[in-house]
Amino acid sequence: ATVAALRESEVWRLSRGAFERLTATHPEATAHLLRFIVTRLDRVIRHETMPHAPRSFTLVPVGPGVPAARFAVLLAAALKRLGRGEVQLLTAESAGRDIEWFHRIETESAYVLYLADAAPTSQAQLCLRQADRVLMLGMLDNMPAQGLPPQMVGEQLFQPRRELVLLRHKSELPPG
């Protein structure tokens, strides 16, 4: 099969002999695998895609004076009120972690918010690679002239959808 990873991944190869030993020892694994294959094949035949709601968001400040950390805290609190589970807010402190750590955090949490640096740093690149959705944060009174700097877009086969979120000061126009 041809696959494209949406984010950093580790690929393991299971030899035919190991697969046969696994299925002989655990026949229930064979039944589970067959159900999975039939379901996927049925979707391919019907040209159906499997949409999944975004669960990992990268917040990128674009333009000067964006209170990205404050927005991140408020967004995390709002997502927590949805009651779907734990919300993790990850900052530059998580940059040195390995792929398994990020996988565990994303598996155990309903939502993960990655607060990226405004500059094209390795931490910002990591946050962008982990995102289902990128929220570009700008100020209403100082809207950014462009989106992400070209150095931050990267060369991924699939780019996550990007949304522009314009923040305002309380004294400015009411939302509408």
Image (cartoon, rainbow, N blue to C red):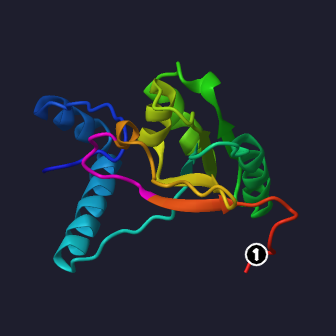
Tell me: 96 left or right of 81. Answer: left
Residue appearing at x 73%, y 41% in the figure: 69
Residue placed most toward the observer, 46 or 7: 7
Instruction: Kindly identify which residue carries mark 1.
Output: 175
Task: Give the overall secondary structure of the magenta segment.
Answer: loop
Residue 160 belongs to the span the image colors magenta: yes
Instruction: Determine the image quadrant of residue 79.
Output: bottom right
Image x and y of residue 108, in percent: 61, 43
SS at mark 1 in the image? loop
Tell me: 104 left or right of 44. Answer: right
Residue placed most toward the observer, 79 or 73: 73
Query: Of all residues shown, which one is farthest toward the right?
Result: 171
Classify 154 as above or below 173.
above
Tell me: 54 left or right of 25. Answer: right
Badge 1: how crowded within 10 Å, few (<14), some, or many (20+)?
few
Tell me: 149 left or right of 17. Answer: right
Image x and y of residue 135, in percent: 55, 54
Residue 59 belongs to the span the image colors magenta: no
User: What amino acid is labelled 1 in the image?
Assistant: Pro
Instruction: Determine the image quadrant of residue 55.
Output: bottom right
**Magenta-colored span:** 154-161
How many numbered discs, if any? 1
Classify 138 as above or below 89.
below
Residue placed most toward the observer, 60 or 12: 60
Image x and y of residue 128, in percent: 45, 41
Q: Looking at the figure, which quarter contains the C terminus?
A: bottom right
Query: Of all residues shown, which one is farthest toward the top?
Result: 96
Residue appearing at x 56%, y 50% in the figure: 57
Image x and y of residue 1, in percent: 13, 50
